[in-house]
Amino acid sequence: MYWIDHTRLCDDIRRQCAHLFTALGRVDPETPVPHCPGWDAAHLAAHVHAAFTWAAGLLNSGTAEFRPPHEFLRDIPDDAVDSEAPWPVYVDGLTRAHRKTPLGERIAGEHTGDPLAESADALVDALLAGSPDRPVWTCVGEPRSRFWAAWGALEAGIHRLDAEAMLGVTPELDRDVAEQLVGFTLEVVAHPSSTPFFDPRFARLRKSGERILVRAVGSTGGPGEWLIHLVPSGPVLLEPGSGRPDVTVEAPGELLLPLLKRRVPLSAPGVRTTGDGDVMADWLEHVVS
């Protein structure tokens, strides 16, 4: 799942957050976020703060059990969120509740200042405080700290795109790191234990044996290809070359990652699709995290 150095992922979190916070500081808090329907810039800032606070809390506690984000956000009343709701509904409710708190109002007004930037620093500090193999709860794979470095880089990079989209900017991510996050994303999607963290639409994904080949153009160090098999038990990853794909989607890593996270369309310049495009479109429609 991992081939990029832990420290490099931590550096990428800091770098992406710098762009993210700068973009947030240049827009009105009520500016709608194009890629997050129903959210404005203040919601995005509150979400990022909550996410990084959660991850840092998990790492610092060293917990082996799942603990929901609101446990680490002491200003949110327990009855303000529905912890039994599907994960995307819970996250949206948490974000809206956090946005209304005094801390959320402060985040919306300051953007780059305390405590938003401090939440990013706290996450990176927690990641660098111990070994990448330090035990901690994760939703997939080995329960190790390195998972949260990749997760943090994914959150920072994707939400940087969200923030800069409000400015009409189309940035380029680090190609190698983006390819690592493509692999990380697909490993998470293909692991049964991650299912509760996806939108309920995930259950309606095709399951009749279709194969999707995802190829990172210009790969310099990662595997470069992933073959997804859609079977009744859910998507699984096969060795590339072990079956003929129904559809192949190709793009450089810095474009492939936003595509898989639904920030750019299949029709975007630089994305090449061959075969049954409906299979890939169905994947993008149902794999929402």
Image (tube, rainbow, N blue to C red):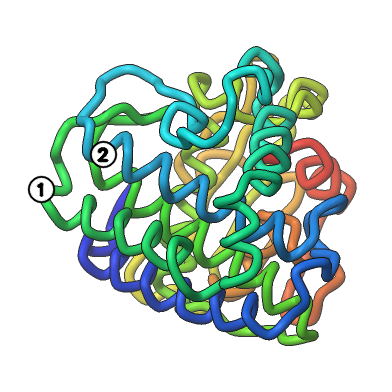
| Point 17% across, 31% down: residue | 135
Q: Is residue 34 left or right of residue 209?
A: right
Asked whether residue 212 is in view, the answer is: yes
Give 205 or 276, whichever is nearer the viewer.
205
Q: Is residue 6 left or right of residue 139?
A: left
- Mark 1 residue element: loop
The Cα atoms of the two marked residues, 1 and 2, are separated by 11 Å
Examine the rendered structure and indicate whether residue 234 appears above or below residue 263: above
Give 264 or 130, whichever is nearer the viewer.
130
Q: Find out whether the residues at labels 1 and 2 contact each other: C-beta distance under 8 Å.
A: no
Residue 59 marker: 2
Give 51 or 154, whichever is nearer the viewer.
51
Q: Quadrant of residue 90?
A: top right
The residue most toward the front is: 102
Q: Is residue 93 left or right of residue 55?
A: right
- Mark 2 residue element: helix
| Point 29% across, 65% down: residue | 10
Residue 252: x and y in percent read: 58, 75
Q: Which residue is mark 1?
A: 131
Mark 1 vs mark 2, foreground winner is 2
Examine the rendered structure and indicate whether residue 274 appears above or below residue 96: below
Residue 213: x and y in percent read: 63, 51
Residue 242: x and y in percent read: 51, 40
Q: Quick one: label 1 or label 2, which is nearer the N terminus? A: 2
Residue 283: x and y in percent read: 77, 42
Q: Is residue 105 left or right of residue 145?
A: right
- Category of crowding for the residue at label 1, using alpha-carbon neighbours closer than 10 angstroms: few (below 14), some (14–19), many (at least 20): few
Q: Quadrant of residue 64?
A: top left
Amino acid bearing label 1: Ser
Q: Quadrant of residue 45?
A: bottom right
Examine the rendered structure and indicate whether residue 195 appears above or below residue 76: above
